[in-house]
Amino acid sequence: MSDRIIHALTITSVLGSGIVAGVFFAFSSFVMAALARLPANQGIAAMQSINITVINPLFMLILFGTGLLGAALAVGVYLAWPQPRGLLLVAGAVIYIVGVLGVTMAGNVPLNDALAATNPQSAESASWWAGYLKDWTTWNHVRTIASALSMLLFLLAL
């Protein structure tokens, strides 16, 4: 890979992981707290709506595209150029793939799937909602830290 291509792909990885970190930070710092202040049935309904609207081409492109781009960049750079900058790119990509995409698929998505099947008006939904908020937010903190750390590593590689 040429230095120009590496540079452009690294900048794109910085931007993608930074955007994802910002979205996750918003949820960790105030969105989930705001939903927790609502009556359980309203909080559940609001989060169900969020979980539907977040699945859109632009967000999916940034979320998954950043992981794919980081992986391709790290593999290509590391194989051809095993210098400290290559190690930063590999670390950034691994942290993003495991800490963002892996946690999303293994932690947040199963919780969201269970939420989608929940009737906000049911008697047990209020106690279930409290557990959901705690578990989902904990996993989201991991994603926030991982995407921010990936952004920092990609940035340092520049």
Image (spheres, rainbow, N blue to C red):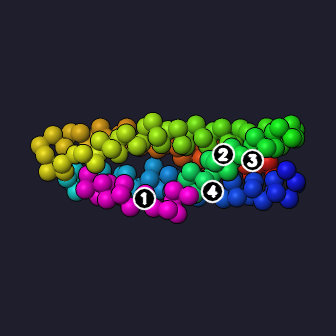
Describe the element under mark 3 as helix, strand or loop.
helix
For numbered disc 4, what is the local secondary structure?
helix
Give the crowd class for mark 1: few <14, some 14-19, many >=20 residues within 10 Å: few
Q: Residue 46 colored magenta?
A: yes
Which residue in the protein does label 1 denote?
Answer: 54
How many C-alpha atoms fall within 10 Å of the one at disc 4: few (<14), some, or many (≥20)? many
Q: State the CA–CA distance, disc 1 to disc 4.
A: 16 Å
What is the span of residues highlighted in magenta in the rendered image? 44-61
Compare marks 4 and 3 and give the one earlier in the sequence: 4
Labels 2, 4: front one: 4
Q: Quadrant of residue 35?
A: bottom left
Q: Residue at x 86, y 37 (%)?
A: 82
Residue at the disc numbered 3: 73
Q: Nearer the viewer, residue 111 or 37?
A: 111
Check whether the beta carbons of the residues at disc 3 and disc 2 lie within 8 A of each other: no
Residue 150's label in the rendered image is 2
